[in-house]
Image (tube, grey):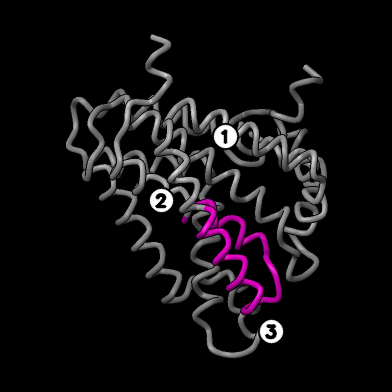
Amino acid sequence: MASLRPVQSVLAFLTILPAGRQNHDIHYVARNMYLFPIGGLAIGAIVGAMAIGISPFLHPLLVGLLVTGALVIITGVHHTDALADLADGLMTKGGKAVKRKAMLDPAVGSAGVAALVMYFAGMIIVFNTGFSSGLAIFTSIIAAEVIAKYVMVLLANRGLSAWEGFSSPFTAAMKDRRKIAAATGIMLAIVWLVSSYVGLIALGVSLVIAGLLKFVSGKSFGGISGDVLGASNELTRLSSLIVLSSLPTLPLVTTIF
């Protein structure tokens, strides 16, 4: 079981799953952040299995609503809350100190509410736009989750913390080239297996979004923060699902069966 502790720590951090809360030490999780794509695989498989089970019986909009709710619940609402905080910080007028204060305010402002409404609307609508089957939904959710988790790893690798806080252990630990190489390899293997070339297109779009987030966060806050990392997960999940629903393809995983 000791060999599974790094994966358990990642799952315990990213989800509400009973994966062993004794493994929730933030510095230990940060050292194993390169395993985040595996956490994305687990989340995607669980929620994707639910989606493939309900899709034959429910309207696609209802499937989108339930899938979005399941993702929010299983991840403990942390990343969704981060998206609202980031929107509040970015839309506040003033210097970096003022924007940081707005982002750290526990109350959700109008910008945060607007961001959440747009995000949830996009997540619900995307399931009504082009998925041809339950299997396509299943594989797309997995690919989107793995890409979203990888983007967090990449931002921690490429960015610097705006201040000493929640993101600091992650940005410090992920400067290791071997770890970012491992995360990249894990992510590419899973994405290619479940979504083929369309997954790589979704990855490309997500990398552009990650670059924009890093640039904007640097200008607004002086670097990245835990909220920036969490928000990147939500934004790239949605962008990946949009791409995957718009350019359907037969996932390579189906050839196994």
Front-lying residue, 177 or 228:
177
The residue stretch that appears in magenta: 207-235
Asked if residue 43 is among those painted magenta in the image, a careful observer would answer no
In the image, is residue 109 above or below residue 187?
below
Label annotation for residue 238: 2
Give the side of residue 237 with respect to residue 93, left or right.
Answer: left
Based on the displayed image, in which of its 4 quarters is residue 141 positioned? Answer: top left
Q: Residue at x 65, y 39 (%)?
A: 184
Alpha carbon distance from label 1 to label 3: 38 Å
Q: Is residue 1 above or below residue 126?
A: above
The residue depicted at 42 percent of the width and 31 percent of the height is: 195
Task: Choose top left, top right, bottom left or bottom right for residue 179.
Answer: top right
96 is higher (above) or lower (below) than 28: below
Residue lying farthest bottom?
Answer: 94
Q: Check contact, mark 3 vs mark 2: CB within 8 A.
A: no
Return the x and y of residue 40 as percentages of the image width and height: 55, 36
What is the distance, in whole Å, between disc 2 and disc 1 at their CAs? 18 Å
- The amino acid type found where label 1 is placed reads Leu
Q: Position of residue 125 (x, y in %)?
A: 25, 50
- Residue for badge 1: 188
Q: Is residue 12 visible?
A: no
Q: Which mark is residue 146?
A: none
Circle 1 — which element? helix
**Quarter of the figure that contains the N terminus:** top right
Question: Which residue occupies the foreground of this view, 173 or 75?
Answer: 173
Q: Amino acid at mark 3?
A: Ala
